[in-house]
Image (cartoon, rainbow, N blue to C red):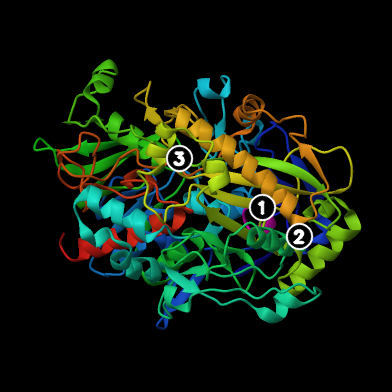
Amino acid sequence: MYIIPASPLFPSILYLGLHLSTMKSSLFFLLASSALPYAVFSAPFGYNQVNGVTQLIGSSFGVLGRDATFDYVVVGGGTAGLTVAERLAEDPAISVAVIEAGSFYEIDNGNYSQIPVDDAFYAGSSSSQIQPLIDWGIVTEPQSPLGGREIFYAQGKCLGGSSGRNYLDYTRGTNGSYQQWADAVGDQSFTFSNLLPYFKKSIHFTPPDTAKRSAGTAADTTVSYDPSAFSPSGGPLQLSYVNYFQPFSQYIERAFTALGLREIPGFNSGQLIGWSEFTVTRDPKAATRSSSESSFLQQAINTSTIQVYHQTMAKRILFSANKTAIGVTVNTANVPYTLSARKEVILAAGAFRSPQMLMVSGVGPEATLNSMNIPVVSNLQGVGQNMWDQPWFPLTYRTNVTTLQQLSNPAYLAQATEEYLTNQTGPLDSPAGNIVGWEKLPTSLRSQLDNSTLSDLAQFPADWPEVELLTVGASTIPVNDTGDYITISTGLLTITSRGNVTINSTDTNDNPIVSPNWLQTKTDQQLAIQAFKRLRQVAAATGIAEQEYSPGPAVQTDVQILEFIQNALSPLHHASVTCAMGQSSDPNAVIDSNFKVFGVQGLRVVDASAFALLPPGNPQSTVYMLAEKLADDIKHGK
């Protein structure tokens, strides 16, 4: 960890913001530069000494514009890409290159990317939220189920990928969801019990700091968690609990309990139904984001010969006459060159750009490739199809409890800044909310679903929650006063609508065409309406939701509720399954259970696109796990 003094190059200006994801605007808080004497981030500059040998950090970065050959070429320096690259590079006999279009988010996005309270910054649904230095700027096609809305879909374009941009929350899916995955791909190594060692391998877990968490509050800040979900030898990714327990969270706990949800020991042991506090990818020493860049890449730079090609665009995967991937054509600052692979190319460009890269390289639906005059290498109909996602929508309430809304008060913000810099606690060390609940709809609401919807929901395992109950200690829409607000929102987890990703250009500088198709099915619409009603029950049970600010009490009928949801729905940025893992007999399958692309040799895919299904929970845990599993598969010759 380096402490970089404030300078014109690294200005110490911190914007604290809660994104406006539903009303195309934002609430921002500005911290003047005089308040922060330092910008804090992990910076891989200078040199290290390893076993007494001086190692120049620049040696870990490839020579841009020059052809080179490696054993493995990894396309995408994001969550999965840096993880698998570091694990492979642990063998000094193996050479690994990583191609990443972006650079360091700590530089390009400053403290926005570092401070927990800013976890949702530049992640709203409006195109005004696009930060081009760290994001691809993808805007969906007009969504007819949402009244034709075109929605900005944040995706990390930086070292660390979306692990440098996400909401920090780390949860694992359920036993039943991974069993369904294992059955779908015909490989029982994908059951939760068999995957658990790979989940553990990435994580260095730090238990909650009870002294810091309890300081200045009378609330019970104890956390129930399962120590067996983690390994003392795990790492380098940092996982911890924040040191600030928001005052409204104790009322959320009481509301969940009153409504029949039970407290469970965290969300990392194969169960989700119940309520608990999030673990977050956060370095407990500095109270800053931990990402694949700040963990795996930093470790690789210190201990291996990894070569990173940053600010470099991958253009096309090259195949030999026998359909073996032999390298990648790339471009840095308009200089084209080739990075060749002796062994394999590993595609880890994310749920949107991995299918794009396959298609521009000749792997994908034949009709799409022919329409672009792309020679067909492997006709795989599933590339870019069957996209799963988990959208969300919020309800906003006025409250008499102090919330993060007060960060707009300069005196409150100054105190919060001092707490954060001095003790790594206070409001700045808090993502949007502490407590989350997961459940299947209760009987009173379930009875309002029709038989076809009930039949669709029955296809999901018994331990797979249908809704996630998320809480935020502020308003996520503009307000016209200085009062306090809370947001009670839901993520929809048993979505039956399927989206798609395609191309209308052979140039990867052009974004792929993304259409999530949220709320396309009657099942999803009915689930969303009943989830809305559940949010109102949660709000009433808190005892502190004084007035519904949005959408307001006038919205009562199912028609009115659905109309509100259609205007408010936004992505949680969990797009997946666009290069689906499956069996060769499955027409939607793109890769097998060893991550190998069907119809070619020497090419694998590992990122959220490679999921067989989207488990409930937050997918970053599964992405890290898959990268660990792939690295292990390769090391064992699979």
Work out which residue is located at the far top of the displayed protein and give it: 371
Compared across the picture, whether 73 is left or right of 475 comes to left
Work out which residue is located at the far bottom of the displayed protein and give it: 52
Q: Viewer-nearest of labels 3 and 1?
A: 1
Helix or strand or loop: what does disc 1 sit on? strand
Compared across the picture, whether 566 is left or right of 498 comes to right
Identify the magenta region.
111-118
Which of marks 3 and 2 precedes in the sequence?
2
Of residues 121 and 182, which is closer to you in this image? 182
| Label pair 1/2, CB-CB below 8 angstroms | yes
Alpha-carbon distance for marks 3 and 1? 20 Å
Amino acid beneath label 2: Phe
Work out which residue is located at the far left of the displayed protein and give it: 322
The prevailing secondary structure element of the residues shown in magenta is helix
Compared across the picture, whether 396 is left or right of 275 comes to right
10 Å neighbourhood of mark 3: few (<14), some, or many (≥20)? many
Of residues 103 and 203, which is closer to you in this image? 203
Of residues 470 and 423, which is closer to you in this image? 470
Residue 537 percent coordinates (x, y): 68, 47
Is 148 located above or below residue 346 in the figure?
above
Amino acid beneath label 1: Thr
Quadrant of res 6:
bottom right
Helix or strand or loop: what does disc 2 sit on? loop
Alpha-carbon distance for marks 2 and 3? 29 Å
- Residue named by callout 2: 248
